[in-house]
């Protein structure tokens, strides 16, 4: 039975790694697109600025339903509306946008740091538990403890996957509950000789591991709602519209076309870069601001535990073969 469980474990984890590598190809492709959006969007903005201005002018005329055209190309209209735009609307929108985007970037970045800290602490506790389990006397309970450690390590790897990491979390489910129950059985079983000091250290390590997992799961689930990003997009769009309102003058467009294109390019480039950064920080295990370097250590822990199970299986096979002779 133990041999079959070990074989199934190898098959399951190998296929998981293959599926993960296959999925990472699409993830890397999408990350590549998001990385170059701040480069491509400003270029498009520069060359499409005249069409944007024409479309905006036509939209304003359509909404206002005017039956006349300004003789000065809209210069007087821009002059009288500028105090309202620059004095009230634009400062209020800019301050609100700056406050929200600052809080968003700071919170998402701190979330990544917290996740990295929790992963490293969990890895340390898993290595500690692995060492403690190796010190226990050989028994069925010891094999169960090692199997639980393998399953918990695989759960961390799965929860740290680059694709849709927030949908893989099950807060109330943890293999450490089974580990805790097995420790209780070993403590109550007088036939298993286990040092009380080792059991005490194991209990403490499991408690710390559960605490770190709770912190990590809370950090993963602590994200901004879609309404938050919708508000940010609305504020950024409002700033862009304010720019079009103030520059909607035929004389200005004719005399300073290149300068207006450059300013429009800078505006679109800045907002594109901010959107790419927010999207990147929102996914901690992918993109440029990623904490994926903390995950490979769990593969090493998993392989170490499986290797010890395989070695134990071989020793049992040798022992059974000797007894049959």
Image (tube, rainbow, N blue to C red):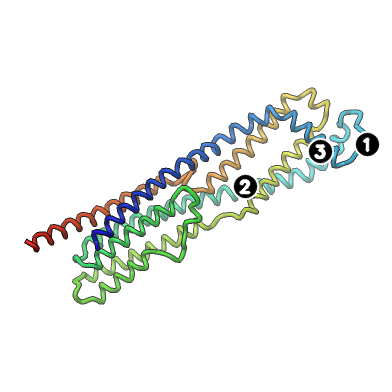
Image marks 2 and 1: residues in contact by CB distance under 8 Å: no
Viewport quadrant of the C terminus: bottom left
Side (left or right) of 281 relative to 157:
right
Q: Position of residue 169 (x, y in %)?
A: 47, 58
Check disc 1 and report the residue beneath it: 67
Q: Position of residue 289 (x, y in %)?
A: 49, 43
> Is residue 301 among the parts visible in the rendering?
no
User: In the image, what residue occupies the spot 34% across and 65% down?
Assistant: 206
N-terminal of the pair, mark 3 or mark 1, is 3
* C-alpha distance separating marks 3 and 1: 14 Å
Check disc 2 and report the residue beneath it: 101
Check disc 3 and report the residue beneath it: 59
Q: Position of residue 113 (x, y in %)?
A: 47, 50
* C-alpha distance separating marks 2 and 1: 41 Å
User: In the image, what residue occupies the spot 46% across and 47% down?
Assistant: 162
Q: Nearer the viewer, mark 2 or mark 1?
A: 1
């Amino acid at each position: 039975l133990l041999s079959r469980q070990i074989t199934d474990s190898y098959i399951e984890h190998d296929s998981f790694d293959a599926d993960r590598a296959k999925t990472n190809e699409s993830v890397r492709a999408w990350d590549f697109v998001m990385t170059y959006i701040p480069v491509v969007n400003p270029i498009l903005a520069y060359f499409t600025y005249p069409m944007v201005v024409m479309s905006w002018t036509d939209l304003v005329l359509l909404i206002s339903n005017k039956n006349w055209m300004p003789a000065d190309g809209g210069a007087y209209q821009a002059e009288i509306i500028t105090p309202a735009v620059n004095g009230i609307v634009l400062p209020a929108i800019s301050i609100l946008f700056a406050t929200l985007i600052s809080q968003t970037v700071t919170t998402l970045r701190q979330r990544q740091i917290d996740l990295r800290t929790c992963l490293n602490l969990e890895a340390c506790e898993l290595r500690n538990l692995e060492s403690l389990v190796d010190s226990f006397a050989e028994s069925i309970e010891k094999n169960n403890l090692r199997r639980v450690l393998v399953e918990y390590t695989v759960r961390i790897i799965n929860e740290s996957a680059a694709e849709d990491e927030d949908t893989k979390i099950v807060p109330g489910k943890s293999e450490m509950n089974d580990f805790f129950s097995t420790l209780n059985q070993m403590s109550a079983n007088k036939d298993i000789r286990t040092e009380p000091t080792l059991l005490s250290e194991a209990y403490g390590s499991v408690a710390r591991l559960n605490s770190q997992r709770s912190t990590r799961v809370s950090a993963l689930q602590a994200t901004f709602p879609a309404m938050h990003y919708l508000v940010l997009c609305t504020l950024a769009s409002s700033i862009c519209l304010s720019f079009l309102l103030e520059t909607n003058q035929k004389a200005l467009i004719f005399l300073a076309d290149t300068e207006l294109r450059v300013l429009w390019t800078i505006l679109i480039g800045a907002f594109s870069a901010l959107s790419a950064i927010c999207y990147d920080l929102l996914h901690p295990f992918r993109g440029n601001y990623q904490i994926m370097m903390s995950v490979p250590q769990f593969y090493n822990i998993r392989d170490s535990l499986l290797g010890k199970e395989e070695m134990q299986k071989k020793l049992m096979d040798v022992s059974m073969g000797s007894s049959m002779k």
